[in-house]
Image: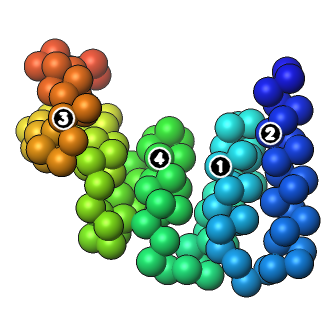
Amino acid sequence: MNNDVEILKQINSYSGIIKTSPADAYPYYKRANAYKKLGLHEQALSDFEMAINLKPDYANALYNRGNLFRELDQFEKAMKDYNRAIELSPDSDFYANRGLCYESMGEFDKALKEYTTAVQWNNQNAHYLVFIRKPRFPPPP
């Protein structure tokens, strides 16, 4: 509960910044992540959308919106965001999460390729290679 209070304070703070700087993508992005932490998905998606509209090359906003889409089982939308984020700014976490998305869709070979790329970028992601050996999700029917 105490953490929720802190997140609500952050939301209020970013809302104030947005009022004074409505053309700045960053406070929308930060508020979207705060909304996401509280499970307020519609508000988070709205703010991610605003941040991306204001700054179309905002790779972190695309990546985080992709994570939310993946959590909501909207895999095609997640893949679109991950692909664009990687195109703009390749990052090991972007590849790893695209791998998670492929894995969620039952595309294990593609997931393995993404995990391998993530490890090549940053060996801190080596744990993903262990998961792919034993799929956590049954293949689709």
Judging depth in this view, the residue of 113 and 59 nearest the camera is 59
Q: Which residue is mark 1?
A: 33
- Which-is-in-front pick, marks 3 and 1? 3
SS at mark 4 in the image:
helix
Indicate whether 51 appears above or below 128.
below
- Which-is-in-front pick, marks 2 and 4? 2
SS at mark 1 in the image:
helix
- At label 3, the amino acid type is Asn
Q: Position of residue 66 (x, y in %)?
A: 45, 54
Left or right of 74: which side holds 9? right
Q: Separation of disc 3 and disc 4 at Cα?
A: 21 Å
* Few, some or many residues within 10 Å of mark 2 (<14, 14–19, 20+): some
Q: Separation of disc 2 and disc 1 at Cα?
A: 10 Å
Q: Residue at x 82, y 30 (%)?
A: 4
Judging depth in this view, the residue of 139 and 19 nearest the camera is 19
Q: Residue at x 39, y 49 (%)?
A: 75
Q: Position of residue 126 (x, y in %)?
A: 19, 28
- At label 2, the amino acid type is Ile
Q: Which residue is mark 4?
A: 67
Sooner in the amino-acid sequence: mark 2 or mark 4: 2
Q: Disc 2 vs disc 1: Cβ atoms closer than 8 Å?
A: no
Locate the N terminus by quadrant: top right
